[in-house]
Image (cartoon, grey):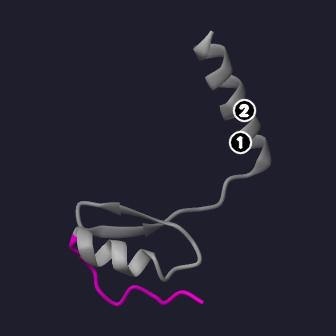
Amino acid sequence: MGQAAKKLHFTREEYIEWEALQQGKHEYVAGEVFAMVGVRQVHSIVADNIFADLHH
């Protein structure tokens, strides 16, 4: 199981090491870490369709 972030700010290297131990994914922005929510299947389908339309 992952561990809670006890620090408020991370260096890039600290974040990479910490993230490797986590079950969920997080986003690193200017030294701060934010939990990322899971994607729903409908969101994935819509995003894939938009990408396919833009790719043509």
Compared across the picture, whether 28 is left or right of 36 comes to left
Q: Is residue 3 magenta?
A: yes
Residue marked by disc 1: 43
Q: Which mark is residue 46?
A: 2
Is 52 situated above or below 4?
A: above
Q: Amino acid at mark 2?
A: Val
Q: Nearer the viewer, residue 56 or 3?
A: 56
Q: Residue at x 69, y 31 (%)?
A: 48
The N terminus, quarter of image: bottom right
CB contact under 8 Å: marks 1 and 2: yes
Is 54 situated above or below 28?
A: above
Mark 2 secondary-structure assignment: helix
The image shows residue 35 at horizontal and vertical percentages of: 49, 69
Is 27 situated above or below 52?
A: below
Q: Amino acid at mark 1?
A: His
The image shows residue 39 at horizontal and vertical percentages of: 67, 53
Q: Which residues are magenta?
A: 1-11
Q: Is residue 4 magenta?
A: yes
Q: Main secondary structure of the magenta part?
A: loop
Q: Residue 12 occupies which quadrant of the picture?
A: bottom left
